[in-house]
Amino acid sequence: MKKIFGYAIILALFMSGCQQGKIYVHYHKFSNYQWPRFDKVTFNIPIEDAGTEADIVFMVRHITQYPYDNLPVNIMLHTPSGEERIMEKEIKIKDVNGDFIGKGAGDLWDVEEILWPKFYFTEAGNYSIEFENIIPKTAIPGLMDIGIKVVKK
């Protein structure tokens, strides 16, 4: 019984260590593995401390049937005081040889890309990041979900 309790404590410490530095992690799941063309996805990020510096990371989970080399998106970041930052970004999904990049497990692939390295949150409050797919089709097939991770530096 003492061994099991000891292992449980070690596992709990390990798991809490893995979460160290993460301020926010959230995914948006797509139904039928498709992101409809005009469906914008918004993440609301609560920042408690002004002066926080962190990486803002975009995460994509897709299946092997994803047909494109990249995922082009428009990204709009809104600060609590109303400032906007807009960026168009192509998230690489395949390398030059047509092989998927990222971490693969069976038919699933995870890709992460830092959108804003060492982003300085100048004020506390609710920041929002909105994503819009800009592939000129009715829907992007092969996407399970997209997400945002904010990791303190």
Image (cartoon, grey):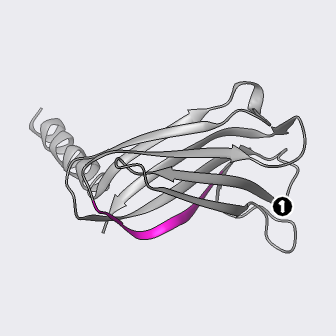
Report whether 102 appears left or right of 52.
Answer: right
Q: Position of residue 122 (x, y in %)?
A: 28, 62
Q: Quadrant of residue 33?
A: top right
In this figure, what is the number of numbered marks? 1
Query: Height in image: 95 above or below 38?
Result: below
**Circle 1 SS class:** loop
- The main secondary structure of the magenta stretch is strand
Q: Position of residue 90 (x, y in %)?
A: 73, 63
The quadrant the C terminus occupies is bottom left
Q: Quadrant of residue 152?
A: bottom left
Report whether 147 appears left or right of 22.
Answer: right
Q: Quadrant of residue 4?
A: top left
Question: Residue 58 lies in magenta, yes or no?
Answer: no
Report whether 31 appears left or right of 46.
Answer: right
The span picked out in magenta is 110-122
Disc 1 packing (10 Å; few <14; some 14–19; many ≥20): some
Query: Height in image: 103 above or below 29?
Result: below
The amino acid at mark 1 is Asp
Residue found at the very far left of the displayed protein: 2
Q: Position of residue 5 (x, y in %)?
A: 13, 37
Q: Which residue does the numbered mark 1 point to in the structure image?
A: 69
* Residue sitting at x 79%, y 64%: 94
